[in-house]
Amino acid sequence: MTAGPGSGAVAGDRDLKLSRVTKRFGDFVAVDDLTLTVPEGSFFALLGPSGCGKTTTLRMVAGLEEPTAGRVSIGDQDITGLRPYKRPVNTVFQSYALFPHLAVFENVAFGLRRRGVRGVEERTEQMLELVELREYAGRRPAQLSGGQQQRVALARALINEPRVLLLDEPLGALDLKLRRQMQIELKRIQTEIETTFVHVTHDQEEAMTMADTIAVMNRGVIEQLGAPAELYENPLTTFVANFLGQSNLIMTEVIDPSGHTVVVDCHGQKVAVVASRCHTQQGRGWLGVRPEKISASAAGCEDHADVNVLTGGVVSDVSFVGVSTQYLVRMPWGQELMVFEQNTGTRSPLTNGDQVDLAWSRDHAFLLDAEQDAQAGVVREDGS
Amino acid sequence: MSQRPAPVVDGETARRRGYGWLLLVPGMLWLVVFFLIPTVQLFFTSLYDPSGSYELGYAMTWHFQNYPDAVRDNFDLFVRSFLYAGITTFVCLLLAYPLAYAIAFKSGRWKNFLLVLVIAPFFTSFLLRTLSWSAILSDQGVVTSLLKSVAILPEDGRLLATPVAVIAGLIYNFLPFMTLPLYASLDKVDPRLIEAAGDLYSSPFTGFRKVTVPLSMPGVVSGTLLTFIPACGDYINAELLGTTRQYMIGNRIQAAFLRERDYPVAATLSLLLMLVVVAMVVVYVRRAGTEKLV
Ligand SMILES: Nc1ncnc2c1ncn2[C@@H]1O[C@H](COP(=O)(O)OP(=O)(O)O)[C@@H](O)[C@H]1O
Ligand SMILES: [Mg+2]
């Protein structure tokens, strides 16, 4: 399921494990009975909307917050009761928390000095080299740009060679361009030093581009865990379907769950879904299709064996976004479905009012439990 | 404050500076009228011929010899003043730091209430409070008999009219001046920095030493100055809680100005005190290096 060096079939001896960890603040449950294994050496992303308990989870690993229940361990060592300064774990804080009274050099050297190791000067020099801040060694944090401060925070944590590096939205304060640059940089550093990274973010694109494994978190629980492509192609819940990318969710009724493909009734039209992507076997269910998986073509195309077709659509909105064109198609039952089409230039674009059929490969849909809210995890335009 | 590279002064910032300068005017005027002119006046007075008197008047003879004479005659008073003020400042720092720390970090919703308590003594007069200390420390008082009963104080020992009483009074009176600036700077210390220190292998005590203390240095510097400077010139505590053997330079200046009316001596001593204190403060602030902080 996961890639990354050091993760094999047997549990690595330095895997980070959270077992049934719960954190309550008064009556409020911030993290709810969470169990999680982060394989040694992997780039692991904890993804979820603001307030879902990501920071709290990290703080429990760092020892800055004590779990109400459950255990935290690294390899064979149970670290649940260990004070933060005794844990082989370092954190890149959301706000960086650089020491304002110390120069960059002393900020980076801080951890080594506290542990009284040898060769602090050389190692600090090397680390500053790695994050390309050598000429800034003598400056105070307040004299650096956001991106530079971010790299100081990273260097200050990494120099201690922690078994697990915790990053709490480390790129959150940077502008888009710098963020993309730092994503690549972080990934490069992680691959180079093979340390386990636990990267907290609410940016699904960031999680997908960087991580080997993503855990999608919502309201204190992990909704789904897996490789980015797996989560994207085969979400288990409407929340994951909506939070990672966008999905069309259509209410359907299961007709025949017996075969290699499950047949559902979609407002009078039959649609097949591969069984491995069906997460409900009977009654009603949400049929999910990604907008870019659907092709819209003029009504009347013939039916393929491996293709699902929904007929009777009418184009109701066209927006051109350069690389692609995004359509809204109104279906006979009133729902508007999203369809994204690459602007390959091989065909003239559709226009408002065109009658279309929608088609997609049977491998590209999924079926979810109808009990869930179809709007769960929808990321609005304003970013909330 | 911060050491950003000097910004290029364009037309607009230059103009803004022109207006900003105006804000200094009222304060400057005040200082010129009520500080600079009187100080110059004091300087001239200190050079009057000592042979004159209040009744007969003084002649201006640029008598610089007043200065060495004043130092020679009052050397022990100067030493005692700086010693008492130094001890007071040190003990105040020891008492106020934990207090300010507790108020800033541990008091929760009691914070404002505790701050009011710190300044509550100011609601009654300085004189009255110091007088009540003479009752507290009196020979028949509870404190004296308690200390005698546990043999800390010998049977014939006393507190009132000793250096202990004067210094105790000074500490009591100046404690809020130490506590408030310390509190102000400790309250600004971001708790996330202390967490970061913990994450970077600092025990709570090391984190305190390496992060909290350096970040509270501006408070330490202003607190010690606000305590030491007025304590050097204080005369009420020595007057009410001590005897002539505990008198400080302030008592001498007060007597010279108001009782003996020996203006040249009073002016000379005032200026000497001011010069020595300013010199000490400059050296201290340089060494503490506050300009590097924040
Ligand atoms: N010290 C605390 N006291 C009370 N509630 C808290 C505390 N820390 C976090 N919470 C609550 O727990 C929830 C999860 O917070 P957090 O882990 O910071 O979320 P995230 O990092 O995913 O945005 C939030 O609703 C937050 O208000
Ligand atoms: Mg957070």
Image (cartoon, coloured by chain):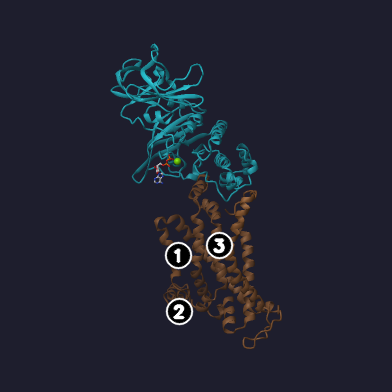
Chain colours: A cyan, B brown
Residues flagged by tags 1 and 3 on a common chain: yes
B147 or A186, nearer to the observer:
A186
Q: Does the residue labelled 2 lie within 8 Å of ligand 1?
A: no
Sequence-wise, the earlier of marks 3 and 2 is 2
Q: Mark 1 lies on which chain?
A: B
| Amino acid at pointer 1 | Val
Asked if the residues shown at circle 2 and circle 1 are in contact, with their CB atoms under 8 angstroms apart, the answer is no
Residue ID for mark 3: B222
- What label does residue A311 carry, if any? none
Residue A79 appears in the picture as rendered: no
* Res. A232 image quadrant: top left
Q: Is residue A361 above or below residue B51?
A: above
Residue that mark 2 sits on: B139
Q: Position of residue A104 (x, y in %)?
A: 60, 45
Residue B157 spot, x, y in % from top left = 49, 78
Circles 2 and 1 on the same subunit: yes
Seen in the image, is A346 located left or right of residue A132? left
- Element at label 2: loop
Q: In this orientation, does residue A266 appear?
A: yes
Q: What element carries label 3?
A: helix
**Which residue: 49% across, 66% down?**
B175
Q: Mark 1 points at which residue?
A: B118
| Residue A217 higher or lower than B274, as above or below | above
Disc number lying in front (2 or 1) = 1
